[in-house]
Structure formats: C-alpha cells, structure tokens
Image (cartoon, grey):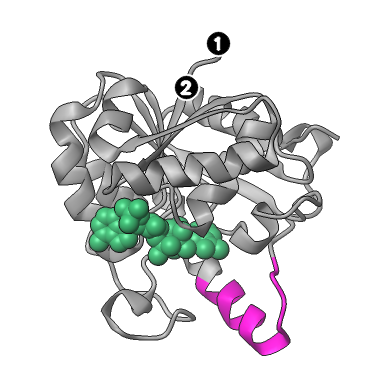
Amino acid sequence: MSRPIAILGGTGPAGMGLALRWARAGETIIIGSRSPERAQEAASKIKQRVGEANVSGAANVAACSAADLLALTVPFEGQAGLIKELKPFFKPGSILIDATVPLAAAIGGRASRTLGVWQGSAAQQTAELVPKGVKVVAAFQNCSADSMNGDDPVECDVIVCSDDPEATQLVCELAASIPGLRAIDGGKLENARIVEQLTALLIGLNIRHKGHGGIRITGLPRSAYRSVG
Ligand SMILES: NC(=O)c1ccc[n+]([C@@H]2O[C@H](COP(=O)([O-])OP(=O)(O)OC[C@H]3O[C@@H](n4cnc5c(N)ncnc54)[C@H](OP(=O)(O)O)[C@@H]3O)[C@@H](O)[C@H]2O)c1
C-alpha cells in the first residue's frame, strides 16, 4: 500500500479534485472533514468514479493522525482554526501541502481580491501554526477545481514552494502524477505570496471570460518541468 495522503477539509471542490486525481494515480487517500459522515460520502463518490480506488473518509483529526503526508484544502477563514485544532495530532516530520488562498470572500468581499496576511501568505501562516518540524509546501493554488474534478488532462503548471527541498521534490512528483499538470520548483515558501495572488487574478478572468483558466510558465529549460508527458 502506498504512503497515504490525508486531505484535510477534503470534501470541497479543491480537495475532491486532488482526491480524484491522486486516486486515479494509485495513491491511498483519506478524505478529512469536520463530519466523518460527509467524509465517507465524499470517499464513496470518488470510488464510484475510480475503479479499485483506495479512498476512505474520516474526521479531520483521525485523518491527520493517520498520515504524515497531508493536504489542506479549506477556505482561508477556516485555515488557522483547523490547524490549531489539529496541532496535537500531526506526526513529527509530516509534509503538509497547502492550497489555501486568502480570498477576500472570507470576509464577505470579492473572490477576485485577496486579503493581506501578516505572515505574507496563507501558506506562511500555516507554517507559523504547525508544530515545529512539520514541512509546509504551498502548491495547487492555481489549479481550477472544475478542471481537477473532470476527466481531461489539467492544463496548468503547479508552482511548488517550500523551505525544504526534499518536500518540494516529493510534492513535484505528486503534482506531476496528474495528467496535464507540470510541476515547477518555485523556490522558498515566501514565494507562495505571489502564487496565491495569481489565483485571485484567475478567478477574475474566469468570471470575465466564463472559463476555468490555469497558468503556464514558458521558456524554462525542460529540466525545470516535471510531468508525466
Ligand atoms: N475551488 C478551487 O477551484 C480552488 C483552486 C485552488 C485552490 N483553492 C483553495 O483551496 C481551498 C478550498 O477550496 P474549496 O473551493 O474546496 O473550498 P470550500 O468548498 O469552501 O471548502 C472546502 C471544505 O472545507 C471545509 N470547511 C469549510 N469551512 C470550514 C471552516 N471554517 N473550518 C474548517 N473546515 C471548513 C468544508 O468541509 P467539511 O464541512 O466537510 O468539514 C468544505 O467542504 C480554499 O482555500 C481555496 O482558495 C480552491
């Protein structure tokens, strides 16, 4: 059995997209939720779409306790509270992939605008809140959940930012296991502040042009891109 990936707050479109794509890639997935019933329902939906999927659902606490590879897919308004609740349950040395974007929608504003975050980005806020030794990797903020929940290859590059090169490499591999996605090492976690801002721009473009746009970075040497293709 592969190393399980727990997706905390995984019942929404962003978490379900990752669960679907990673289940298809053969990963073992635990979908986390505030409600175990909702998590199990979400897991059933993935199983209906992916034959032989290794997917289960559990309360966020149980999901966090069961894996040392985690993804966080909650709205910004729930991010800090959930991490504080889960703090005692992180395994030492865990890798936490953070896809959170600090959209102004969190306080009733527009989803095409972001909020200022004291630490610099939602991912840096996460890094401040997790137990020492948990490695935070910012990724997937620019991937449209509409595309991720579909069946076609996902036309997007994933800029992976963290202060731990090994964690960056592992998350690049996970991103590259999803057809269409190309992973790029985006450097330090502080660069997440730029990547998160791009999401607000993409949301504005998607509203204006009625699409589900992603990003592509051009002109780098082939060695900079990791993909299945
Ligand atoms: N949607 C996209 O296209 C997309 C793309 C890239 C990144 N993102 C980012 O990924 C994150 C999740 O996006 P989403 O669209 O999936 O969001 P969402 O549907 O609003 O929320 C995802 C899940 O988070 C849980 N949740 C909601 N409020 C919470 C709170 N206050 N405390 C704890 N858990 C809470 C809910 O699960 P339970 O009720 O089951 O606990 C919900 O199903 C956001 O930060 C978003 O900016 C989204």
Horizontal side of residue 61 vs 18, given as left or right: left
Q: Quadrant of residue 2?
A: top right
Q: Is ligand 1 closer than 8 angstroms to the Cβ of mark 2?
A: no
Location of mark 1 (residue): 1
Residue closer to the observer: 34 or 136: 34
Which structural element holds mark 1? loop
Residue closer to the observer: 39 or 192: 39
Amino acid type of the residue that numbered disc 1 sits on in the rendered structure: Met
Horizontal side of residue 65 vs 68, given as left or right: left
First to last magenta residue range: 200-213
- Where residue 134 sits in the image (x, y, percent)? 29, 28
- Where residue 184 sits in the image (x, y, percent)? 65, 41
**Alpha-carbon distance for marks 1 and 2?**
8 Å
The correct choice, above or below, for 73 with respect to 168 in the image is: below
Residue 4: numbered disc: 2
Residue closer to the observer: 57 or 101: 57
Which residue is drawn at the image coordinates 17% and 53% (left, top)?
81
User: How would you rate the neighbour count of disc 2 (Cα within 10 Å): few for under 14, some for 14-19, many for 20 or more?
Assistant: some
Q: Is residue 144 visible?
A: no
Which residue is drawn at the image coordinates 63% and 48% (left, top)?
158
- Where residue 56 sits in the image (x, y, percent)? 46, 31
Residue closer to the observer: 88 or 124: 88
Which residue is drawn at the image coordinates 37% and 49% (left, top)?
38
In the rendered structure, does residue 201 fall within the stretch colored magenta?
yes
Q: Quadrant of ligand 1?
A: bottom left
Disc 1 vs disc 2: Cβ atoms closer than 8 Å?
yes
The correct choice, above or below, for 49 with respect to 74 in the image is: above
Q: Main secondary structure of the magenta part?
A: helix
Q: Residue furthest top?
A: 1
